[in-house]
């Protein structure tokens, strides 16, 4: 078997949008991925669903894997012919022991590439409104590891008098020692400084003070690792240069429960508004294109073609394209259950005439009954799991309805159950997402969160399980986002 390759990938400090384009490209190629806590679970959104995951992170006080064990895993996976992604928070070579891992690979003649990452001491401070340098205030910066500040051979006299901005990474447990050493060696106790905890994530917190008092204040405020400690006059700029903490959804960790493909537009909007997004793909889509072939010869006979989901649109038109079917043969009027489904139809160059005002079958029927009459032939390509309501009421009105199951929804997978602990708000967009999430993470875990339903049908499923929820007036994902921003979901 040919030997594989290892990509040592810097994942940045936590915000998934700080991943580089090259990191995303390489992650998608990997057959095995090894990751740790500092990289965040959001980066796992970019791996292939068949990729095997291994958690090898290190939490303070407890190591799941030793460094030697990690090195051996990299070598073994590569020798098995895998494309291995080793994800590391920040940049692999900045206090990340990336060099040790690469040296282990070179000893075995294993091919590798190192993908640089955006280092936390720049990005975290940026997100806290603190520039590392600023003209006439700080023309230099100096970075130290504070992990073993009481043991490292740091020239404290030079550090205390060098000027510029001083940054200590991984030094929260030694914060008091660092402050004392700097003061003992001549640094002004009133020097401005700040501690930034869990920077670029929903847990980001910032404390500004002076060198003398910062340690005691972090204890009062219950700060904990991971933190970055910064000392210098640039700290005074944090209020004026603060941008991230002013975003409307800053501090929120919001869980999207849709399929991977459907989650993308909503995730981007939430992140842009300052939220940290946790994705648990409770639904997997299994397309059944063979079912459509039974109806292709009579598509031109239908008076109406009705879509009740975006997935239905995609599955239907993908088959037509694959079978070289000319959609001009379809003479019927198109109907869509809501704006998202309408947009998917329009992408195919077709303008639906009937559009439901709300994302429920009852609303779509309310619009359709203005047009349909007894004897009309109606085609509904839909999910095998969806409600039969629409077909039933149309048949009751005397219409001839054919339903075609173009796809079905299956229970998805949880890449890392631990990520759900940090979630404060869960968004449910269909009854199946409710049922599947209960199976994946447990009803007790969900009950501890704020729950938001996209509409009354999903709400009914939540009620069955005695789960309290809020709902926006508009039964769309944009409606949920607007409600979250307005602060009306509490």
Image (cartoon, rainbow, N blue to C red):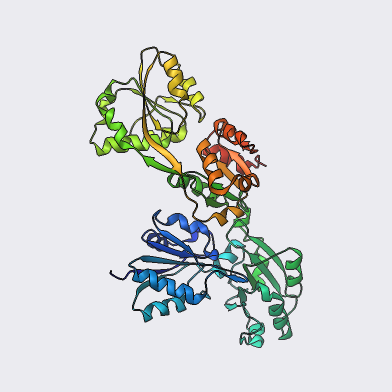
Please state which of residues 380 and 199 is positioned toward the viewer in this rendering: 380
Which residue appears at 63% of the width and 38% of the height?
469
Residue 72 percent coordinates (x, y):
43, 74
Q: Is residue 345 above or below residue 362?
A: below
Please state which of residues 146 and 82 is positioned toward the viewer in this rendering: 82
Q: Is residue 462 above or below residue 365?
A: below
Residue 101 percent coordinates (x, y):
44, 76
Which residue appears at 50% of the width and 56% of the height?
42
Q: Is residue 41 above or below residue 273?
A: below
Quarter-of-image position of residue 310: top left
Position of the C terminus, as image quadrant, is: top right
Residue 154 percent coordinates (x, y):
62, 86
In the image, farthest residue toward the left: 324
Quarter-of-image position of residue 340: top left
Position of the N terminus, as image quadrant, is: bottom left
Let me know if residue 362 appears in the view: yes
Let me know if residue 97 appears in the view: no
Please state which of residues 458 and 304 is positioned toward the viewer in this rendering: 458
Residue 329 percent coordinates (x, y):
25, 26
> How many dots with numbers?
0
Q: Is residue 91 above or below residue 315?
A: below
Which residue appears at 26% of the width and 39% of the height?
322
């Amino acid at each position: 078997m040919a030997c594989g390759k290892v990509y040592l990938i810097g994942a940045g400090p936590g915000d998934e949008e700080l991943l580089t384009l090259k990191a995303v490209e390489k992650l998608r190629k990997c057959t095995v991925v090894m990751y740790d806590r500092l990289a965040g679970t959001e980066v796992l959104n970019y791996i292939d669903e068949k990729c095997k995951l291994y958690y090898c992170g290190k939490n303070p006080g407890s190591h799941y894997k030793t460094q030697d064990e990690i090195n051996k895993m990299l070598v073994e996976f590569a020798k098995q012919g895998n494309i291995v992604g080793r994800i590391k928070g920040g940049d692999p070579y900045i206090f990340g022991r990336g060099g040790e891992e690469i040296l282990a690979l070179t000893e075995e003649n294993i091919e590798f590439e190192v993908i640089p990452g955006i280092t936390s001491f720049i990005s975290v401070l940026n997100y806290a409104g603190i520039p590392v340098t600023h003209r006439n205030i700080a023309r230099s910066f100096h970075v130290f590891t504070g992990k073993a500040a009481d043991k490292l051979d740091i020239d404290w006299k030079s550090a205390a008098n060098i000027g510029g901005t001083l940054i200590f990474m991984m030094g929260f447990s030694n914060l008091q020692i660092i402050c004392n050493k700097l003061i003992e060696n001549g640094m002004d106790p009133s020097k401005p400084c700040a501690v930034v905890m869990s920077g670029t994530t929903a847990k980001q917190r910032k404390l500004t003070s002076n060198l003398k008092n910062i340690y005691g204040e972090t204890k009062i405020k219950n700060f904990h690792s991971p933190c970055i400690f910064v000392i210098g006059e640039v700290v005074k700029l944090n209020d004026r240069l603060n941008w991230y903490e002013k975003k409307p959804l800053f501090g929120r960790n919001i869980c999207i429960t849709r399929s991977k493909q459907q989650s993308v537009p909503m995730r981007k909007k939430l992140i842009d508004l300052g939220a940290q997004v946790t994705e648990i793909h409770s639904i997997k889509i299994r397309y059944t294109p063979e079912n459509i072939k039974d109806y292709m010869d009579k598509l031109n006979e239908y008076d109406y073609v009705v879509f009740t989901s975006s997935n239905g649109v995609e599955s239907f038109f993908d088959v037509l394209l694959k079978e070289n079917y000319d959609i001009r043969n379809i003479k019927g009027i198109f109907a869509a259950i809501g704006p998202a489904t309408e947009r998917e139809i329009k992408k195919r160059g077709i303008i639906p005439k009937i559009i439901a005002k709300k994302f429920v079958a009852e609303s779509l029927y309310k619009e359709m009954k203005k047009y349909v009459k007894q004897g009309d032939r109606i085609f509904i390509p839909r999910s095998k799991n969806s409600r039969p309501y629409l077909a039933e009421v149309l048949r009751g009105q005397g219409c001839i309805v054919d339903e075609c199951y173009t796809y079905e929804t299956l229970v998805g997978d949880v890449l890392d159950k631990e990520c759900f602990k940090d979630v404060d708000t869960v968004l449910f967009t269909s009854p199946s997402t409710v049922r599947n999430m209960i199976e994946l993470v447990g009803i007790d875990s969900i009950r501890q969160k704020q729950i938001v339903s996209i509409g009354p049908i999903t709400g009914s499923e939540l009620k069955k399980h005695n789960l309290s929820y809020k709902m926006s007036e508009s039964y769309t994902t944009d409606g949920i986002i607007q409600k979250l921003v307005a602060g009306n979901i509490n």
